[in-house]
Amino acid sequence: MNIASPLIPVRSDALGPLTRGLLRRCALVYGVLALVGLLLAQTGESSGTQAFGLGLVFPGGGFVHFAAGGWPSVLAHVGCLLLSFLLFVISLLLWFGTGNQLAPLVAWLGSAIAAWAMAHEQTLAGSSLIVSALAATTLIAGVRQFRRNLEARKARLVTRNATITDWPAVATPLSGVGSLPRVGELSPEDLAALRFALDRALQPVDAFDGFDIIEQFQPSALRYQINNLGYVLSLASYTHLPAMHAWLHEAQRNLIEKKKARRVWQYWGLENLWGNFSTNADPVARDNVMYSGWYAAQLGLYEAVTGDLRYQQAGAITLEGAGGQRYVHDYPGIVRQLVANEAASPFCLFPCEPNWIYPLCNNQAVVGIKAFDREHGTHYWRDIEASYRGHLEREFIDVDGHMVLIRSTRTGFTIPGLSSSKEDAIFCFWMHAVFPDLARRLWAVARAELFAERGGALELLPLKPWLDPGNYRFNTAYALGALGMAAAELGDDAALAAVRQHTNALSTHNAGGVLSYPGCSIWTHAFLLKTRLGRANALADLVNTGMPKPWREGPVIAEANYPDLLVARAVSDGVALDAVCYPGRGGGVVNLGIGQLRPGVRYRCEGTREGEGIADPRGQLGLTLALEGRLAVKISPLS
């Protein structure tokens, strides 16, 4: 069986209709502003008014009007021009980084006002021509660069379409008995790596030891670290530990609770103020898919693997502000708000920070919506799916097939140079649960460009250091994690093996049985963990199918002390429990609590000191293990 991977469409226009419309509007607004500025420069009664007009044509252009007289005066005013332009560039970075749309306006208009305030008597003849030339040169250079890039992207389109073929559909690995998904066993090294996530999740909810504390506006923010750890633990539950409740479910709940901490979401009050001119500090109410969408995915995956509906309850996610404000939400309410935002946005996809749409963040939102629909029989996703996909393909997939990482809702601008096959791999992982054909097309391209057949084996081509978004350092580990988790999800064993050759060579640190990658962020640790924990269709199965009934209803490990007792595998067939345990520190006798047994039934307890036991009226059974190394445990009814 093959899954058709659609070719990258050959477009008559490089941009989607909404993007074209926004760019035309932006050009028109600037054209009117420049004409007004030139009119003031020619007819203004004072030199200050004339300078102000030129300042509207080009950032700092007003200072050119006074670049006359001796060299000191010329150099001083040219310096003001350069400084103004530099400040404007910095303001654009602030606009991108924090959604602060005031910054570019203040920088541009502020330089015009500063020039007006000078009002020198001595002016430069021909200043209008010079400023006009500066503006025209900048615009022409930008358009020429866009066209050169477009031609290069069109050339890549032809090459890439030649590499895209129907991708062999990889079946979900099934166990030898029945049709349940196969559950793997974590190696001791995998367990040590998983403990990196567990240690951070199982600390008190208000503690953030081991997290990267840098800033709260861009990718290093706490919210992304929390979400990524939550996704990893849900994946671990599904692929290796479906019958492990105890500390694994507690860790996931702790992370959900951490998202409610004021230090995690209070950034939105400032960002919404300077980006949307709104005083509403509620991080769920408008835009901000980087909080609500990622949170919805975390909640949906948690609910899918645990069956725990506590976050369905009204007010389960209540955020308390420093001034006594209370923003009352719950998982269903967040989903409804996401759908309302999608429906209200002309792009269907809606912004993270004010003005800027990130398709990846919207993809997390879609996963949260789809998971909710499957669990509760709603059809929120079905109602917006066609619009979402249409806008995604028209406005957020580039001419060469790359995903556009960011798009301005107010200008249509994107930031060139951000897209790459490495970033597309992240889309592959998340999009596979939503649009598997698009995910496989992205992977086919990435595989063709980043891997090579040599000596009958697939090898990963050398990777340049890549910016780790979680701590803004450069490393190869982030890209390796992105490629590895995508290869695992799409069932590409050859590519996964090639990636693992490189990840195995990364520098590691093991302290107290916890394995980490020095210098790498929680983002990168989470990606590398998904490479270890993933399997073919893991995320797609979890979102679209969920936990099989035997896993939900069979015996589970309900009580265990972390890290005294580590579990490398735990799965039930609905009747019996199979588990593999390891000591977390030193070994010895540890307690184990089994739940979801049939009350009053006698169970054989292989691997335990007791050998057998009878479930109490609550369906629970307390046991002890003598742990010195790997220990297989099986709990099965005697009759």
Image: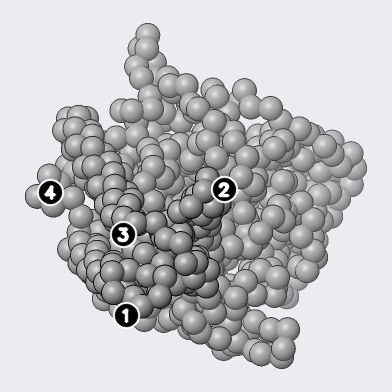
Query: What's the mark number on residue 128?
Result: 3
* Residue at 28%, 44% in the rendered image: 141
Where residue 440 sits: x, y (%)?
Answer: 29, 42
Residue topped by disc 2: 72
Where residue 567 sits: x, y (%)?
Answer: 70, 47
Residue type, numbered disc 4:
Arg
Q: CA distance from mark 1 to mark 4?
A: 27 Å
Residue topped by disc 4: 11
Judged from the image, the secondary structure of the residue bearing numbered disc 3 is helix
Residue type, numbered disc 2:
Pro
Residue type, numbered disc 3:
Ser
- Which residue is more in the foreground, 468 or 363? 468
- Which residue is more in the foreground, 604 or 596? 596
Q: CA distance from mark 1 to mark 3?
A: 43 Å
Image quarter (top left, top right, bottom left or bottom right) of the N terminus: top left
Where residue 568 sits: x, y (%)?
Answer: 67, 43
* Residue at 76%, 51% in the rendered image: 210
Left or right: residue 431 versus residue 236 is: left
Tell me which label, 1 or 2, sits earlier in the chain: 2
Tell me which label, 3 or 4, sits earlier in the chain: 4
Residue topped by disc 1: 344
Residue type, numbered disc 1:
Ala
